[in-house]
Image (tube, grey):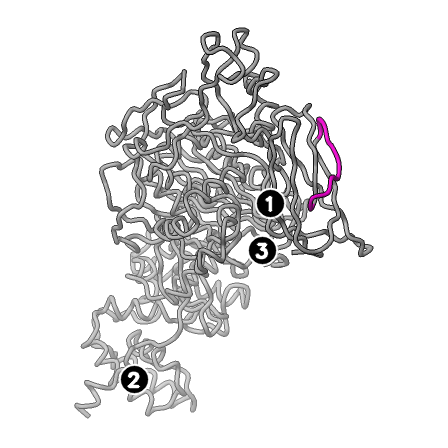
């Protein structure tokens, strides 16, 4: 018997599944899951509220604080009542004994069970304090229906935490465990009211309640049917429950901001639904701490008709052009790029600019701000896919699991997938790196729970390169299509939008020194819609969120790590020997290793300065030497259309021979001359390929030859539709001055 006394308690005391509970940083309930056995059963709390503790002991066990787990007087009285009635009318159990019954999941009532409860109750009193026993009882007592425990009952019946319950509310809940299947809110109203009032009267007679408190408590109504629990951050709750099942979780979320972002998402979802766009996800991160302040994993839908239960913050989606700032920063870091350096912006096969316009050549910072695809592809080609693939992993992206060859140059325009969670972290880290330029290592993982990620890692990019990247994203004028950005420019938000190929994913991410806001808009099932565009669908959501935030700081340029260089005014490259105009610019120290301007060269003109000449056709002493800004023929073709100051090279004076190494013209399409596919229409007929050339002087004639045969002449508009047979071919195009280009290619029928 002594052995049983010490070892008879259940281990652990309670085994039932509990709900996962999520609280905000200000201890506000954000949501709860139902337990595995379909009960609303919260995990054991730290303590029992004083009012409820008084009510439950006065109702169930007035001598709870005095007896050793068993009250002999109560047991004797119960034995007499049951004997005279011939059945069990009273149990005489103390709260300690009832806790034992709850731990054993309410076995059948027999005298043997009562004997065991007596033994185990005394053991429980030796093991736990009175407060701990009362807390266990309050946490596992039934409160009617599928409501178990005081905390769950307070929320289900009164929509408030237990410590905020009034005397009347505590008294109502205190009488429920005695007969939870007989009376509970919404059932047997009169009987419940009678029991509550009887308990309140006892509290008044025991001088626990004053007369005023007693009268006020009697006047309070009983609760109606159970309330729904809060659903303020449902996706974070269910995502966290997979890892922390049955725990009380205290998140870093700001409950007020969370509710505001919920409303923003709801409003935008209502508008977007008209265009058959049904899903939105938003993440707000505090830059200084890396703490998540708002987490909207998906927009709400009562019927879950559009996969609204999916947490899209943790889902992989096509990246679109949202990764371009990381390539830009990487190339600045390695000295392969300067902010004003001209990049090629002419048509290529792999992609096209969103607006299908081309500027020929565009500065790197403008290309980034306007999110031009073609310059980004040329940047990646120069930097190398393999290096950027590795760099993305250093930035914290885990989704690029294929080889660099698998992605190719499409990596920068949506060829890979990212998670909104990792994207928000990567942008937040850029802002943090600028704010703390002397910290080479810092915690780069964002978190929803304090101290969840404390590991410090070395940041892969210098603060100087990051600062110039963020500067490009906040200072360069956006195109007209990005209507509304001017309203927010005063807040100095560095932001980037992106759209995946096929209009399936719209992104917008912005950062300030205080916050990072990341937004995804689209359809969870991947259905494409014309309106799924970063600027039009995701950016307005992002701006609305920023409008709710307190933004006071601006990004400041790091004091160290910069060097002043002279760059060519027209090309943005380091000043070359032939450049005539320059500007001074602060760049990362690695900028000293950038390329020297390749676009300026010396030419000789006649004395009228209208024609080019050389020493074979013109007196040397009459030549005028000039430096000239010259773009390659294809770039010049587009550049001159939008830059009226650009001056093409003058023509050669008659009888002068041009430098045959020059290429005044080149192919615009196709760019890939290895394999050219003949398109086939819906009727099955082969369609011609339109060969197109850009000429620095379109009015000049071009002569076209295919496989040695003359096929035609073009002037002004240099396009030639051809329908070659399958197999290998050679194209030769020449002009009147003898300049020529030739390309070998293979024709393949059908689609690639």
Where does label 2 land, which residue? 117
**Mark 1, secondary structure of its residue:** loop
Where residue 87 sits: x, y (%)? 43, 89
Q: Is residue 421 above or below residue 355?
A: below
Residue at (23%, 69%) from the top-left corner? 130
Return the mark for residue 140: none
In the rendered image, which quarter contains the C terminus?
bottom right
Q: Which residues are magenta?
A: 707-717
The CA distance from mark 3 to mark 2 is 55 Å
Return the mark for residue 349: 1
Disc nearer the start of the sequence (1/3): 1
Residue 223: tell me if it is visible.
no
Q: Is residue 445 above or below residue 172?
A: above
Residue 243: tell me if it is visible.
yes
Camera-side residue of 77 and 359: 359
Residue at (31%, 24%) from the top-left corner? 565
Query: Is residue 438 part of the magenta span, yes or no?
Result: no
Return the mark for residue 524: 3
**Mark 2, secondary structure of its residue:** helix
Where residue 419 sits: x, y (%)? 46, 53
In the rendered image, which quarter contains the N terminus?
bottom left
The CA distance from mark 1 to mark 2 is 81 Å
Where residue 37 sits: x, y (%)? 46, 74
């Amino acid at each position: 018997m002594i052995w049983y006394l010490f070892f008879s308690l259940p281990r652990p005391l309670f085994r039932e599944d509990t709900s996962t509970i999520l609280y905000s940083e200000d201890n506000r309930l954000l949501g709860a899951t139902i337990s595995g056995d379909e009960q609303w059963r919260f995990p054991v709390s730290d303590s029992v509220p004083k009012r409820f503790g008084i009510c439950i002991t006065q109702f169930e066990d007035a001598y709870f604080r005095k007896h050793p787990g068993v009250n002999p007087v109560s047991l004797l009285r119960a034995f007499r009542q049951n004997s005279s009635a011939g059945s069990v009318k009273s149990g005489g159990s103390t709260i300690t004994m009832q806790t034992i019954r709850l731990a054993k999941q309410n076995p059948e009532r027999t005298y043997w069970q009562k004997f065991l409860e007596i033994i185990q109750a005394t053991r429980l009193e030796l093991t736990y304090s009175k407060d701990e026993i009362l807390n266990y009882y309050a946490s596992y007592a039934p409160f009617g229906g599928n409501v178990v425990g005081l905390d769950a009952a307070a929320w289900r019946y009164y929509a408030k935490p237990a410590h905020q319950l009034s005397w009347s509310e505590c008294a109502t809940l205190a009488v429920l465990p005695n007969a939870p299947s007989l009376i509970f809110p919404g059932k047997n109203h009169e009987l419940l009211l009678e029991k509550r009032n009887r308990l309140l009267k006892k509290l008044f007679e025991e001088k626990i309640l004053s007369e005023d408190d007693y009268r006020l408590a009697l006047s309070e109504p009983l609760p109606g049917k159970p309330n729904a629990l809060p659903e303020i951050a449902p996706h974070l709750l269910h995502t966290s429950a997979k890892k922390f099942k049955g725990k009380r979780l205290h998140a870093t979320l700001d409950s007020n901001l969370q509710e505001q972002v919920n409303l923003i998402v709801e409003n935008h979802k209502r508008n977007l639904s008209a265009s058959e766009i049904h899903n939105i996800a938003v993440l707000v991160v505090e830059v200084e701490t890396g703490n998540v302040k708002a987490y909207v994993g998906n927009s709400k839908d009562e019927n879950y008709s559009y996969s609204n239960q999916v947490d899209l913050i943790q889902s992989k989606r096509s990246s679109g052009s949202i990764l371009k700032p990381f390539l830009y920063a990487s190339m600045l870091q390695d000295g392969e790029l300067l902010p004003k350096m001209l990049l090629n912006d002419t048509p290529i096969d792999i992609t096209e600019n969103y607006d299908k316009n081309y500027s020929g050549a565009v500065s790197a910072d403008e290309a980034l701000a306007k999110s031009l695809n073609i310059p980004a592809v040329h940047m990646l080609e120069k930097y190398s896919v393999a290096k950027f693939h590795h760099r993305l992993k250093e930035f914290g992206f885990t989704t690029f699991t294929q080889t660099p060859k698998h992605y190719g140059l499409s990596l920068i325009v949506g060829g890979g997938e990212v998670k909104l969670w990792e994207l928000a972290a990567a942008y937040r880290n850029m802002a943090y790196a600028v704010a703390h330029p002397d910290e080479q290592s810092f915690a780069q993982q964002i978190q929803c729970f304090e101290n969840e990620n404390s590991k410090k890692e070395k940041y892969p990019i210098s603060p100087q390169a990051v600062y110039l990247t963020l500067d490009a994203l906040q200072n360069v004028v956006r195109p007209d299509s990005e209507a509304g950005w001017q309203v927010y420019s005063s807040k100095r938000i560095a932001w980037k939008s992106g759209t995946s190929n096929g209009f399936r994913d719209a992104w917008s991410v912005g950062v300030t020194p205080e916050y990072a806001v990341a937004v995804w808009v689209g359809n969870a099932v991947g259905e494409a819609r014309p309106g799924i565009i970063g600027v039009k669908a995701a950016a307005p959501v992002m701006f609305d969120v920023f409008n709710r935030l307190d933004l006071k700081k601006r990004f400041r340029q790091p004091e160290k790590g910069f060097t002043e260089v002279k760059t060519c005014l027209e090309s943005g490259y380091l000043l070359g020997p032939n450049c005539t105009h320059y500007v001074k610019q602060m760049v990362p120290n690695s900028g000293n290793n950038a390329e020297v301007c390749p676009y300026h060269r010396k030419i000789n003109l006649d004395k009228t300065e209208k024609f080019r000449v050389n020493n074979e056709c013109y007196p040397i002493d009459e030549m005028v030497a000039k430096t000239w800004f010259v773009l390659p023929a294809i770039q010049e073709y587009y550049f001159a259309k939008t830059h009226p100051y650009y001056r093409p090279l003058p023509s050669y004076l008659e009888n002068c021979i041009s430098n045959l190494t020059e290429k005044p013209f080149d192919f615009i399409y196709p760019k890939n001359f290895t394999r050219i596919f003949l398109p086939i229409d819906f009727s099955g007929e082969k369609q011609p390929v339109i060969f197109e050339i850009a000429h620095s002087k379109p009015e000049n004639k071009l002569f076209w030859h295919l496989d040695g045969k003359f096929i035609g002449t073009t002037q002004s508009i240099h396009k030639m539709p051809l329908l070659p047979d399958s197999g290998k071919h050679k194209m030769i195009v020449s002009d009147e001055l003898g300049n020529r280009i030739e390309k070998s290619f293979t024709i393949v029928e059908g689609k690639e």
